[in-house]
Image (cartoon, helix red, strand yellow):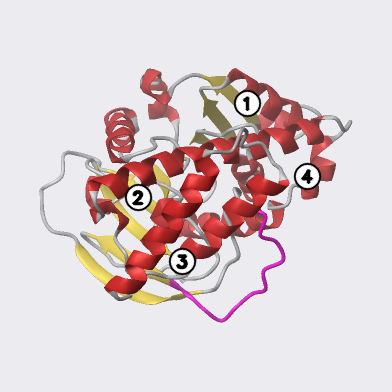
Amino acid sequence: MGCDQEDMLVQKVCEIYDSISTLESLKPSKDVNTLFTELVLICMPPSPIDVTKLSVTIQEIRSKLIRLCGQAEGLLESHFSTLLGSFETPLDHINIFPYYTNYLKLGHLEFTILNKHISNPNPNRIAFIGSGPLPLTSIVLASYLRTTTFHNYDVDPLANKLALNLVSADADLSKRMFFHTTDVMDVSNVLNDYDVVFLAALVGMNKEEKSTVIGHLAEYMAPGSILMLRSAHGARGFLYPVIDPSDLIGFEVLSVFHPMDEVINSVIIARKYEKKPVLVHPVIDHQGLAPAMVLPTKCSEIQGFNHTDRSGMIEELAIHDQEQLI
């Protein structure tokens, strides 16, 4: 991408930000859906832009835009969680959520990545930090991991109330899925009990907040346990916070998946060091191609994408063995 193209991209993103920031509400509506759809379509194409190195002014706009995306995403999930909760058996109707199919695909991707790097194919306990009112990641993964218990953490009591209502009528999930209303920074020794910890993309809205959360997890997670994170790459960093693998102090980064198609979030998997690591430079190896996936951001109203032949990019960063994801 040349400087002119990059400038045009940034200018367009700023124009959309101006429009979004003047909306009276970010609840699902025609205007909200239209603007976020336009934003996603602009940021989706693979781009070499490094949003973390833009000007201070643009960084401020980007930070505010990420927060607006997070608010819109939460309101969208709350809307559909409330709607689903009105049914006697909510999960029987879960496909009314527009992006349920996308969650199935993302869940399968993350399950595949996890299986490549975890010693126990059936982990006993998984924590999801920032589960929200519609904990589809936990619900989808629970369909693969039939004996695993899922502990979902969120700071919003209403979000947890809505989420609990979704699974309470399910005989299986009601026994394996638990909800905790608390800030992850107030969760300490119990983190040692989890084999895997998922960190939602919008827990920690900027580099500083994200680093603080990751540092907390590094202190209290069990040695050898797995951390799964969602990040963003290229222009998609206008939608979600970007995690640099070098920021994962206390963890060995095992795999980084950067999509180059409609999948918005990057996926990072890391392992808590068994003991204090020796500081060496990781080996970076660009390996293979991953199959195209379809995952528009939940902020948007993009539906009905077709599978394409465009592929993702996998980076394997490991101090020891290099494993190929696919």
The magenta segment: 301-312
Image side of residue 265 versus residue 146, left or right: left
Give the number of the disc on residue 242: 2
Q: Residues within 10 Å of mark 3 (few under 14, many from 20)?
A: many
Q: CA distance from mark 1 to mark 2?
A: 25 Å
Q: Residues within 10 Å of mark 1 (few under 14, many from 20)?
A: many
What amino acid does circle 4 point to? Ile
Q: Which residue is mark 4?
A: 94
Q: Which callout, 4 or 3, points at the residue further toward the start of the chain?
A: 4
Q: CA distance from mark 2 to mark 4?
A: 30 Å
- Camera-side residue of 310 and 22: 22
What amino acid does circle 1 point to? Ala
Q: Which residue is mark 1?
A: 159
Q: Percent x, y for residue 288? A: 40, 77
Q: CA distance from mark 4 to mark 1?
A: 17 Å
Dominant secondary-structure state across the stretch colored magenta:
loop
